[in-house]
Image (cartoon, helix red, strand yellow):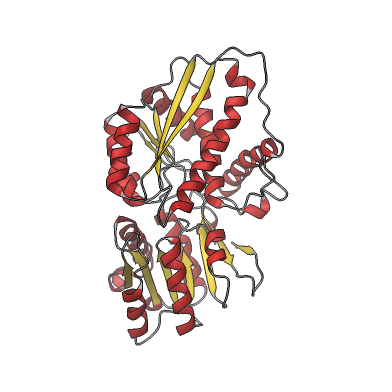
Amino acid sequence: MDSIRNSAGNYRLALAFACSVFLQAGSALASELTCADNFPAATKIVKLGMSTALSGPNQYLGLSMSQGVRARIDEANCAAEWRRQGIQFELIVLDDNYDPQIAARNTQTLIEDHKVVAIVGNVGTPTAEKSWQIANEKQVVFYGAYTGANLLRLNPPAPFVFNYRPSYDQEMEAVVADIVARGIPIKSIGLFLQNDSFGNAGLAALQKALEKICGDCQQDIFQMRYERNSLKTGAAVEEFIAAEVKPRAVILAGSLEPSAEFIRFAQRLSPVTRFYCLSFISPSALQKKLVVGRYQLTSSQVLPEQSAMTAGSTNATGEAYTNEVYREGYMETQLLLDAVAAIQGSVTGETLRQSLARLERQLPGNPGDQQMMNNVWLAQVYNHEQSGVAASVK
């Protein structure tokens, strides 16, 4: 199962790197932050901007991402290494409600009014689709978006776009490999998807993965769609009911609430169906939504499994690290700070771009693709009736 373990062909090195970053983070957050005294006032303010969902159905993603990013920035602002240089980081977060048009306006505001050097932690494919080109055109780094869509993974890459997480193509290859390994026929795969660029990205990734296995079979994927920012899953459920043969595997390229609602209905109609969700849905959040019933649910993940790296780790308030989105925001900010630390002279969009490009070439993966991580893990998700824990599947 090497394709599941490491699509970049360097599993152990990438895992060790990711674990070391977050273990250091867990250690740093185990006690309350204490800012050292006797340093001069900051003379250099490095402004970072974020447009994300702080309200609406996907606010748990935006809030978690912004909290993770802010936690690492707050640590940096207390660290002697930055204070000695008179450098302070400022994070400006604007709410876009997971609405692409609002995200575009926010991006313009962050760049033109707040003069940020980078847009970090965008949540979602539809919002990224409207925002990245604005940042790229203005020579502002667009970094660490919470999406695996290929619209941010051009060849050659857009100069100012840097991804932290692997692509949906990489996630879908791992999912399909698991489905095939379980003996589930390709024709028994269904796709529950958001009816927008995110869902289409999931569809394209599935088609690409299937094409490698069975050629033109990828043209006949059973699709069930719902509208973004809604719980209107009735049509999708009706399609599932109407199917003469119920899909034995359903891949979900959707948001938390509608995906949970669909699983609740579908698993009662077809208990043998196995569900797979992409990492956009936090498995810990989905687990909380599916508190009753027995289901077979596997989640693809782009960070090493939490139990292997954060046992006993808590943040400054004593809260355990249980949210994958928070962890991703924290870890990707660590890499961003590493890139800033390597800059000699002023921190601008251009100098940050150059530094991130140098850093990316030092990491496992495909040098020059401007993507920092290339590993995919699969995790089995259980509810409290079954076991109450998420166990790694590799």
Q: Is residue 186 above or below residue 282?
A: below
Q: Nearer the viewer, residue 47 or 18?
A: 47
Query: How far from the left and from the top, in percent, is residue 270?
Result: 46, 83
State whether residue 270 appears in this view.
no
Residue located 28% across and 29% down the image: 138
Most distant residue in the front direction = 55
Question: Which quadrant holds residue 247?
Answer: bottom left
Question: Which quadrant holds residue 36?
Answer: top right
Q: Is residue 323 above or below residue 297?
A: above
Q: Quadrant of the C terminus?
A: bottom right
State whether residue 99 appears in this view.
yes
Query: How far from the left and from the top, in percent, is residue 75?
Result: 60, 31
Residue located 36% across and 71% down the image: 233
Query: How far from the left and from the top, in percent, is residue 167?
Result: 41, 51
Residue located 49% across and 48% down the image: 8
Q: Nearer the viewer, residue 351 or 240?
A: 240
Q: Quadrant of the N terminus?
A: bottom right
Residue located 67% across and 48% down the image: 310
Residue 275 horizontal side relative to residue 213, left or right: right
Query: How far from the left and from the top, in percent, is residue 267?
Result: 48, 79
Marks counted in the figure total 0
